[in-house]
Amino acid sequence: MTSAASQPQPTPAAPTTDAWGIDASWLDALDEVHTVAPATIERLRAVIGTPPEDLAERTPIVARPGDPLEVDEAEVTCEDGSTRQVDGELPEDFPLGYHSLRTPDGRERRLIVSPGRCWLPEGWRAWGWAVQLYATRGRDSWGIGDLGDLRTVRELAQTQGAGFVLVNPLHAVAPTEGQEDSPYLPATRRFRNPVYLRIADVPGAEGVDVEDEAGRALNDGALIDRDAVWALKRRVLQRVFDSRHADDGAEKPFRDWWWHEGQPLMDWATWCALADAHGPDWHGWPAELQDPRGEAVAAFAAAHDREIAFHAWLQWLLDVQLRAAAEGVTVIQDLPIGVAGGGADAWAWQDVLAQGVSVGAPPDAFNSLGQDWGSPPLVPWRLQAADYEPFVQSIRATMAGAGGLRVDHVMGLFRLWWVPSDGTAAEGAYVRYPHEDLLDIVALESHRAQAIVVGEDLGTVEDGVREAMAEHGILSYKLLWFEDDAPAQWPAEAMAAVTTHDLPTVPGLWTGSDLAEQREHGLGTDEDLERGRSSLLAHLGKVAKKSTPDQAVRAAYRRLAGAPCTLISATLDDALGEERRPNMPGAGERPNWCLPLPVPTEELAGHPGVQAVAALLADGLQPKKTQAKRKPSKSGNPG
C-alpha cells in the first residue's frame, strides 16, 4: 500500500491575476502559497492606474510572418517606406521589423514583426571568460578596468580558442560626484559609462596634457575609487574635447553619429548637463526642468549646447572603443533589471514608470526579508501605450556593437515583484507583463544584431518561463553551485558556469574565507552559514580535503567542462585564485563592486591558473566547432 506521503500531491493553484495585472497570491520555492494583503493590492492598483478604454485598439500588434492578425483589412507602411496590404494574416514573406499599420477607419498602430527566435548558429558551442571589467585593470589603466583592458582580455580569449567574453553592465551613471558603484543600478540602459574610456585611445589625446602619471597612480589603491577615477578622466576628456572642438568644427564622424542617434542621445546628453547643474536626481530639479519636453528644458539646451555636445561626444568615443575592443569575439553584455529612479531614463520616460514603488524579490530561502533593488518598474499598460519603445531601445542599445546579451533576472519579462515605497520587501506583490510580446521583441533585436541571448533564470522560476525561453531561442543559465544534476546532464540550450558575481568564488568557498566574511557582516547564523557552505562544497564532487584552492578550482572546472551546454563560462576570479566575490548582497559596509583583480591584465596570459582553466574548457569542447561570425553592423542601425 502506498503511503500518503508518497502519493502524488495536488499542484498548487495558479495565482489569480486581476485586471491591473496584480497576482493575488504567490508561490515560494517550496510551492507554499502566500496571499497578498488587500491593502497592498489597492495601493498597487492606484499606482498602476486605469488604462484608456481604447487601449486594446492602440497597442502594438506583435506577430510573426504567417500569423493571423486581429485586424482584417489594413495598409502597412514598412520601415523601408514601401506599403503592403494585409487581410487577416501576415504573408509568410512579410519583412521583419517595426512598421505602421492603418485600418480602413483611419486607426494607426505599430506592427512589430518578429522571427520569434533569437539568433544562434546551429551547432555552435564555445567557452569564454566572465569578466568584471572594472576589476580587470592593467598597468595602463587609470585605477579601473577600461575598454583597453577589455581588448586585452579579448585578445587573450582569441589566442586560447575562446568564443566569447561576458562582461558586467557597462551602462552609464550620473556624471557627477558620488559615482554609483553598482553596475546594476545605472542612470540609463541606453548609453554607456565614460569611466570605461581608455584615455590614450581617444583621438586628440596626444595633443594635450593627459596626466598619465596621475592616472596610473590610481592603480595603487587597494580598492577602485570611481570618484577619483572619474574626476581625473573627466578633466582630461574635457581638455581633449576643447582642443578638438575649439570652434564650431566638431569632427565629422562624431557629428554624423550624433545625427544618426537622434533624440535618445539628445535626451541623455541634456540630462547629463542638467545633472551637472542641478544634481543627479531629477526629482530635485526646479519644477520647470522636470519635463523633458517642456520649454524650460529646450531653453536650457539652447544655452548649454557645448556642454551637451561634450556628453554626446563621450558616447561616440565609447561606441568606437567598444567595437574595437570586441572585434572578432562575441562580447555578451549584461542588461540590468532596471534603472535608478532619479536617472536619465526615469526622467525621459517618467510617464511610463511607476511612481512610489520599486522592484525587488519576495522572501525566499536565501533572504528571509525579501529584497528591494531600488529601481522603479515600467507600468505594463503604459509600456504598451508607448509602443514598447523604452524596452526596444534598452535591448537594442545593450546589444549594439558586441554580439551578445545576458538578461539579468529574465523572469522580469513575465512578472516583477513590486514593493511599495512605504512598506517592506515582504509586503509586495507580483505584477504581470506581456511576456510574449517582450520575448518576440528580444528575438527581433537579436536577429538584427546577430546577438546571442542568455536569460539569467536563477532562483524561484515559475512554470512556463523556461519553456517560453526555449521556444524563443533564449539560453538558460546553469550554475554548478545550484544544480543537483551533474553538468553532463544539463541541457544544451544553456550557458554553464560555476558561480556568479553574487556568489562565492571557488577559492573563497574552499578556504572558508567567504564564510568568515559572511559571519563578519552578520548575514546568517553560524548553523545556517555552515550548512550553506557544505551544500556548495558538495557540488564540487570528490575533492580531497587537503587539496589546495588551485586544485579545487581545477576540479570545479573539470566538472563544468563535461556540460553539453552551448556556452561554458569561467570567471577570471576563480582562475586567479581570488577569494573575495565581487558582490556580497546584504553586506552594507563591504566594498562591493570595488575589488580589483590581483593580477594586471598584461600578466593574465602567463598566469598558471588562467592557463589551466582555459585548457580544461577547451578540451571539454573538443572537437572544436567553427566560431560564430556576426555581420558587421553600423552604430545605431537596427538593420
Image (cartoon, rainbow, N blue to C red):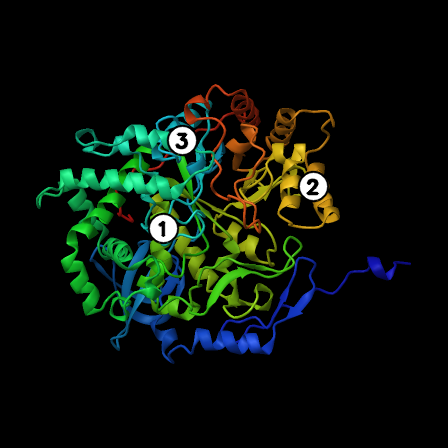
User: How far from the left and from the top, in percent, is residue 206?
Assistant: 20, 29
Judged from this view, the residue extending furthest toward the right is 1
Q: Position of residue 174 (x, y in %)?
A: 34, 52
Sooner in the amino-acid sequence: mark 1 or mark 3: 1
Secondary structure found at label 2: helix
Q: Residue at x 24, y 55 (%)?
A: 273
Quadrant of the drawing holding the N terminus: bottom right
Q: Tag 1's secondary structure?
A: loop
The residue tagged 1 is 173
Q: Determine which residue is flagged by label 3.
A: 219
Mark 1 and mark 2: span between their CA atoms? 35 Å
Q: CA distance from mark 1 to mark 3?
A: 22 Å
Q: Amino acid at mark 2?
A: Arg
- Whichever of labels 1 and 2 marks the residue nearer the N terminus, that label is 1
**Dot 3, how many residues are within 10 Å of its Cα: few (below 14), some (14-19), or many (20+)?**
many
The kind of residue on which mark 3 rests is Asn
The answer to which of 519 and 105 lies nearer the viewer is 519
